Structure formats: structure tokens, C-alpha cells
Image (cartoon, rainbow, N blue to C red):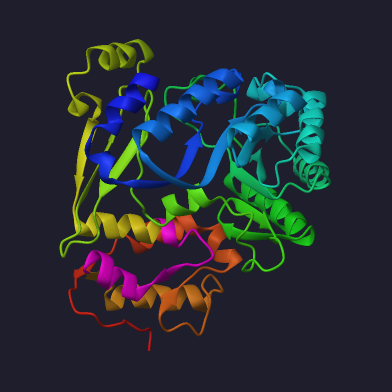
């Protein structure tokens, strides 16, 4: 991994200034503090870094006071801990390595640590999970007052053990309406506990005095991803997005690194060039980029400005798009009275995927003038 970082540091990314770092995508907390230090040193030596945030994923079974103190001393500024659930039968179903007692001990250690920014993850929609389970999880977790909570609905990924069990009829996924009810229960409790929903699955506590509303505890790294900033992913199957929106014609590319661990290690050792790591390389035109930005922006509480589409992507919405937005407003899914942007209400965020799929089925128009579009 050190070698791969050094290789990428000699690529076109050498001209970029990196503002966030995220160590995750697996189980980085199995690394010793010495290993973490080596990786951080390699990053700082290989790239231009001005980090506003360095996030480290932590599994509850790997947590200890000494480990947390060590991470903080190394410069980690934010932790993301995979609690997933505090119900024993749900943890057993997930095949998690930790149990309820381990998760609770980890939360106590986080509260007592020097970390002021950390997040806990919950997974909803598990087979066999009830509304009472969700209510108990959110109630118990919020008692520790995590600065940030992510509540995700379980997704059925292809070629996984769960997908095979579902295909064989051995496990039945929860009905979509029940999953929506579980999300409503979680949202209601979190709102009462002082959390603001700033993205479909992300909730942040009010920040420190003087900070703008609810921004201090938000995930900076994730927010820049949703803001469609370029990102570099290093490691087996890690994804990257390269694009430059400073030109008059936006264009970009996306790829992922070799998925198989042994093949990835062999590629690093042999290093025939950066192209060898660009698996499934996809070239992105302005319309594709604009559609991605619409998809991500409308999943956040800020929504999307029409001027951004014109300035950054050289496209605009059509009247048919605006008609859809008017229907959203009429149903209470989008905020009324906005002339320069569109953003969902909580009801809209609950059904964002379906609404966006419908909206993006309508072609965008090329647009190069510097004029703000309006609903009026």
C-alpha cells in the first residue's frame, strides 16, 4: 500500500491539493498504530496535503482506549464506527465480529476519548428486523450522543452470501414499505434528539458555538463527494473520479483499481503504469456529469441550484423537468417558494431515489449562457 501511494503520487494527481483523507473501505482498524503511521507518512510525502479532515473507519472489536489515543496522536481527526445494530439477533444475522456488549464498550470509549468528531453507523431493513428493534437501536445509540449518525437501509449486493440466500428462498428481504417505516422511526427519534438530516442517510448534531448551522459535525469527506469533487481511491477495487470543471467543456473519467487482492499486489509490484489500475475506465461527458450532480445534490439538504448546472456543466433543465418539480412541490416532496434552486423536503428525501430516477429519464439540454433558470 505504501508503494501504491508513492506510485500515484508521481501521476497527474501530483498537481492536486488533497483536503480530506478517508481510511476505510475494509477494516483499517486491524492495523497497528505503527502501520497507520506509515501509511499517513506515505500520503503526506507523496501528495500535496492540506487536510481539513482525516477519517478512520473503526470496528468495535478493534477499539481500546490506547488505540483511540494513538490514532488521535497520529492526526486522525474523525472516526467512523460500524455499530450496525445493538440487537444480538441482528448482529448474528449480519455475521458481525462484535456483540452488543463490545459495541457498548466501544461507544463508552469514544465518549471518553479526545475525539470530538465521530460517527456511528446503523443498518435498517435487515430480514427479521422489527420497528421495535430499530426504535431500541436508535434510542440506545442516541444516549451516547454521537456527533454524527448514519442510518442506511440494507442493500442487496450481487454475488454476496446474502444475495445467494435470497435467490434460494432461504431468506426473505423486508417489504419496501416496512423499510420506509423503519427509516421514519429512526428519523423521528433522531430529530427529537437534536440531529439534523443533511443527506438521505446522514444526521449531524448541532456544532460548536460560532459554527454555521449543523455543519461542524457533518462528514466533510462525504460532503465533497456529494459535491462532485474529484477523488482518488487507492487499494483493491477502490474507485476514482478525475475531472476538471475549470474548462469550458466539462469532461471526466472514472475507474476502479484491480479487485482481486493478489492481482492488485502483483500489479503494484510490476507497475506497468497508472493505466494498469484503471479498470472499467469510463469517459464522462458534460451531460453524464450533470446527471450525476443532480442525483447527488438532491440527496442533500442543500439541493441543487439551476445556475450551477449552467456554469459548471453547460446544461439546463427543460420545461418538462420544471413540471416534475412543480408536481413534487404539490405533493410536499420539494420545498416551495424557491426560484433559484430545488431541494427536497424530508418526505422527498424519503423517496429520493424513485423521484430522481423519474426526473433523470428526461434529457437535459445544452446550455452555455450565464443565466439563472427559474421556476417562475
Q: Residue at x 35, y 10 (%)?
A: 262
Q: Does the magenta stretch include residue 303?
A: yes
Q: In this view, does 272 lie above or below 73?
A: above
Q: Which residue is more in the foreground, 241 or 12?
A: 12
Q: Does the magenta stretch include residue 247?
A: no
Question: Which quadrant holds the N terminus?
Answer: top left
| Residue at the limit of the structure toward the front, as seen here | 45
Whether residue 271 is visible, yes or no, is yes
Whether residue 166 is visible, yes or no, is no
Residue 40 lies, in percent from the top left, at: 48, 30
Q: Which residue is more in the foreground, 92 or 11?
A: 11
How many tags in the picture?
Answer: 0
Residue 93 lies, in percent from the top left, at: 67, 23
Start-end of magenta stretch: 296-314
Q: In this view, does 168 lie above or below 357?
A: above
| Residue at the limit of the structure toward the bottom, as seen here | 376
Amino acid at each position: 500500500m505504501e508503494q501504491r501511494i508513492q506510485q500515484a503520487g508521481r501521476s497527474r494527481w501530483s498537481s492536486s491539493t488533497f483536503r480530506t483523507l478517508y481510511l476505510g473501505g475494509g477494516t483499517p482498524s486491524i492495523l497497528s498504530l505503527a502501520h497507520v503511521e506509515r501509511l499517513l507518512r506515505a500520503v503526506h510525502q507523496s501528495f500535496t496535503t492540506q487536510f481539513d479532515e482525516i477519517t478512520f473507519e473503526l470496528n468495535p472489536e478493534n477499539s481500546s482506549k490506547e488505540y483511540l489515543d494513538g490514532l488521535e496522536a497520529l492526526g486522525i481527526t474523525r472516526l467512523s464506527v460500524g455499530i450496525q445494530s445493538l440487537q444480538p439477533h441482528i448482529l448474528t444475522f449480519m455475521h458481525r465480529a462484535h456483540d452488543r456488549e463490545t459495541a457498548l464498550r466501544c461507544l463508552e470509549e469514544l465518549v471518553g476519548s479526545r475525539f470530538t468528531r465521530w460517527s456511528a453507523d446503523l443498518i435498517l431493513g435487515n430480514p427479521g428486523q422489527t420497528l421495535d428493534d430499530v426504535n431500541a437501536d436508535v434510542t440506545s445509540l442516541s444516549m451516547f450522543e454521537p456527533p454524527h449518525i448514519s442510518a442506511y437501509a440494507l442493500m442487496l449486493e450481487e454475488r454476496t452470501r446474502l444475495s445467494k440466500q435470497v435467490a434460494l428462498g432461504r431468506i426473505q428481504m423486508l417489504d419496501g414499505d416496512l423499510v420506509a417505516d423503519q427509516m421514519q422511526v429512526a428519523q423521528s427519534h433522531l430529530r427529537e434528539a437534536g440531529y439534523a438530516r443533511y443527506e438521505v442517510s446522514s444526521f449531524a448534531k448541532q456544532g460548536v458555538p460560532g459554527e454555521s448551522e449543523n455543519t461542524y459535525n457533518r462528514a466533510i469527506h462525504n460532503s465533497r463527494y456529494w459535491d462532485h469533487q474529484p477523488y482518488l481511491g487507492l487499494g483493491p477495487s477502490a474507485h476514482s473520479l478525475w475531472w476538471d470543471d475549470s474548462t469550458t467543456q466539462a469532461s471526466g473519467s472514472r475507474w476502479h483499481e484491480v479487485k482481486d487482492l493478489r492481482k492488485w499486489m502483483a500489479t503494484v509490484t510490476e507497475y506497468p503504469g497508472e493505466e494498469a489500475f484503471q479498470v472499467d475506465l469510463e469517459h464522462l461527458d458534460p451531460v453524464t456529469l450533470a446527471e450525476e450532480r443532480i442525483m447527488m445534490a438532491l440527496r442533500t439538504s442543500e439541493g441543487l441550484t439551476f445556475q450551477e448546472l449552467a456554469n459548471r456543466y453547460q446544461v439546463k433543465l427543460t420545461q418538462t423537468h420544471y413540471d416534475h418539480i412543480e408536481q413534487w412541490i404539490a405533493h410536499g416532496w420539494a420545498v416551495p417558494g424557491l426560484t433559484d434552486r430545488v431541494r427536497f423536503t424530508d418526505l422527498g428525501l424519503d423517496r429520493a431515489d424513485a423521484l430522481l430516477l423519474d426526473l433523470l429519464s428526461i434529457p437535459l439540454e445544452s446550455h452555455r449562457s450565464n443565466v439563472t433558470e427559474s421556476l417562475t
